[in-house]
Image (cartoon, rainbow, N blue to C red):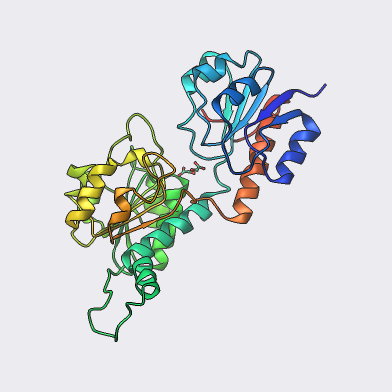
Amino acid sequence: IKPPIFVTRRLPDPAMAILAEHCTVSWWDQVEMPIPRDELLRGVAAAEGLLCLITDRIDAEVIAAAPRLCAVSIMAVGYDNIDRAALAARGITLTNTPDVLTETTADLAWALLLAAARRVVEGHKLIERGEWGPWHPLQMVGQDIYGRVLGVVGAGRIGQAVLRRGRGFGMRLIYHNRRPNPILAAELGAEYRPLNDLLAESDAVVVTAPLTDETRGMFGSAQFALMKPASIFVNVARGPLVREDELVAALRAGRPWAAGLDVFDREPIGPDHPLLALPNVVLTPHIGSASVATRVRMATLAAENLVAVLSGRATPHIVK
Ligand code: GLV
Ligand code: GLV
């Protein structure tokens, strides 16, 4: 007999097919819009497994509404939207989708870094407005990345992939983590720094740390004041790591010099957001892992993880 599961969005076909083969599947039949709260609470009532996304708040109320639930699979590497204490209290297993999105997300961090440093979007807009005048020596001058210092905050899988790309750009590599990781010195030549030292030394700061109680709000006025006047700040992790109003003030004052942001305090943001009033920012709508191939891999892996846990098989992707 196939276990009943609930899926909070219609996923790409390979994933739905894997689930249907092993489970009795109910799902929220939309691709673009998140499931309304009441539908989620209704949807999980009979479910033994739940496949969810970062747009779903999985808290004690959802867990209480799902008396038979024993497995939750999130199609994401980050799981700060899930109340892990509520899961643990019921012995519910959580899985995520690391590894498959690492390189894709590191690519986007670099896209934002280069675009912010070299004013790519500003230049595009200038041409669009018909304001491209004759070439002149100081037109659209930006900051160099090649040969400078790259500082990564949160050197997990994605952070390490960001650092690895820095070698191709002749950069000196430093990182900050909860604790030093000797493998990074050996394999990448990346040196550990306390956060304040990293901020003072880096020409480019890239944030790839998970959102936890310790990392929430870790970047504010005091941290931005330590950064170099010509530095670039990039966040592809989670918005709430940054005190957004303090970042806006810092960018307005010109330190950091520019920012590339894929994540925000409250998503989605609209055209009236104060960040959009600044010329020195490049924004993307939380698309770190959004390549065609990677999103299919994430959906497939999320499905495989859920099937594995429900059938008592091992999966390396259980969140500990
Ligand atoms: C997306 O933000 C993810 O955590 O995979
Ligand atoms: C995510 O995969 C990370 O560990 O950075």
Asked whether 174 or 79 is in front, the reply is 79
Total label count?
Answer: 0
> Picture coordinates of residue 310 (x, y %)?
70, 25
On the image, the x and y values in percent for residue 215 come to 33, 35
Quarter occupied by residue 144: bottom left
Q: Residue at x 29, y 49 (%)?
A: 274
Is residue 62 placed above or below 216 in the rendered structure? above
Tell me, yes or no, if residue 191 can be seen here. no
Asked if residue 130 is positioned above or below residue 297 in the image, the reply reads below
The residue depicted at 57 percent of the width and 55 percent of the height is 291
- Position of the N terminus, as image quadrant, is top right
Q: Nearer the viewer, residue 101 or 266?
A: 266
Residue 135: x percent and y percent?
A: 29, 85
Residue 313, image x, y percentages: 70, 28
Give left or right: position of 135 versus 79.
left
Q: Is residue 190 visible?
A: yes
Q: Is residue 189 left or right of residue 320?
A: left
Q: Is residue 130 above or below residue 320?
A: below
